[in-house]
Image (cartoon, rainbow, N blue to C red):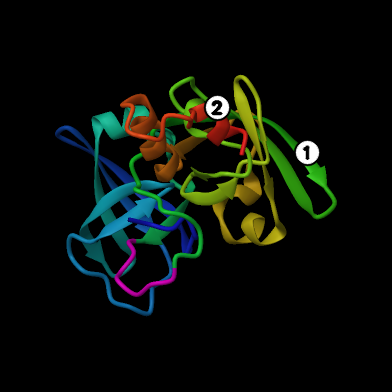
Amino acid sequence: MFTGIIQKTGVVAELRDREGGKRLWLKTEAWERPYEAGESIAVNGVCLTLADQRPDALGFDVLEETLRKTNLGGLTTGSTVNLERALRYGDALGGHLVSGHVDARGTVRSIQAVGPDRRVEITAPASVLPNLVPQGSIACDGISLTVAELFDDAFAVHLIPTTLTETSWGDMQVGDAINLEGDLVCKIVRREAAEGRLASDWSWEKFQNG
């Protein structure tokens, strides 16, 4: 599990074809805590296993399905990605619970400057939108963000200067593909409602409208 609080960014050093996918090498600044072989690290919100390491980079094996379903398939040498190591017991939960299992890709529809901040609209597939609620949480490229507005085919988030400088989103452009993971709590509640395991006077519509 992750929190959606980006700890570092990485830069793609190499993408090498391998059977069933690619080997992804990322350059990044070293963490204070040593890496452990096989540990989970979220790369643009995608939970990947640390497969290898060398003095200048970390290596991950990425499956074809993951390349197809997420924006990792569009990475090239020099691309910047967001990184977060998995939660340990006792760690602070600064954002929200993020599994690292991306639901789908969205697309940046518009970017608007609002003082030092930015308002970003992201189109999202029908499979993602039902799991969003106004003022609820969503992970975008691994970043824990608040749903500021919700539309029929998209949602809006607001980015503060810290997010713009500490993540890969400072260089965001209209048309960029974004990895989306809906709020885990919303998914659980929605499933419980669909299975009829909640109070008889409860409805998903009430939950969505606060």
Q: Mark 2 or mark 1: which is in front?
A: 2
Side of 123 where 113 appears, left or right: right
Of all residues, the one furthest to the right in this rendering is 115
**Residue hosting label 2:** 205
Which one is nearer the viewer's eye here, 130 or 16? 130
State which quadrant residue 164 falls in.
bottom right
- What secondary structure is found at the residue carrying circle 1? strand
Which residue appears at 49% of the width and 26% of the height? 130
Q: Is residue 6 above or below residue 123?
A: below
Which one is nearer the viewer's eye here, 91 or 15? 91
Which residue appears at 36% of the width and 25% of the height? 194
Which residue appears at 34% of the width and 33% of the height? 192
Picture coordinates of residue 62, whole percent (x, y): 26, 41
Q: Is residue 128 above or below residue 115?
A: above
Quadrant where the C terminus is found in the figure: top right
- What secondary structure is found at the residue carrying circle 2? helix
Which residue appears at 56% of the width and 56% of the height? 167
Label of residue 8 in the image = none
**Residue hosting label 1:** 112
Q: How many marks?
A: 2
Categorize mark 1 by other alpha carbons within 10 Å: few (<14), some (14-19), many (20+).
few
Side of 147 where 75 appears, left or right: left
Of all residues, the one furthest to the front in this rendering is 200
Q: CA distance from mark 2 to mark 1?
A: 30 Å
Categorize mark 2 by other alpha carbons within 10 Å: few (<14), some (14-19), many (20+).
few
Q: Is residue 209 above or below residue 151?
A: below
Which region is colored magenta?
86-92
Q: Is residue 63 above or below residue 6?
A: above
- Is residue 88 highlighted in magenta? yes
Picture coordinates of residue 28, whole percent (x, y): 42, 64
- Is residue 147 highlighted in magenta? no
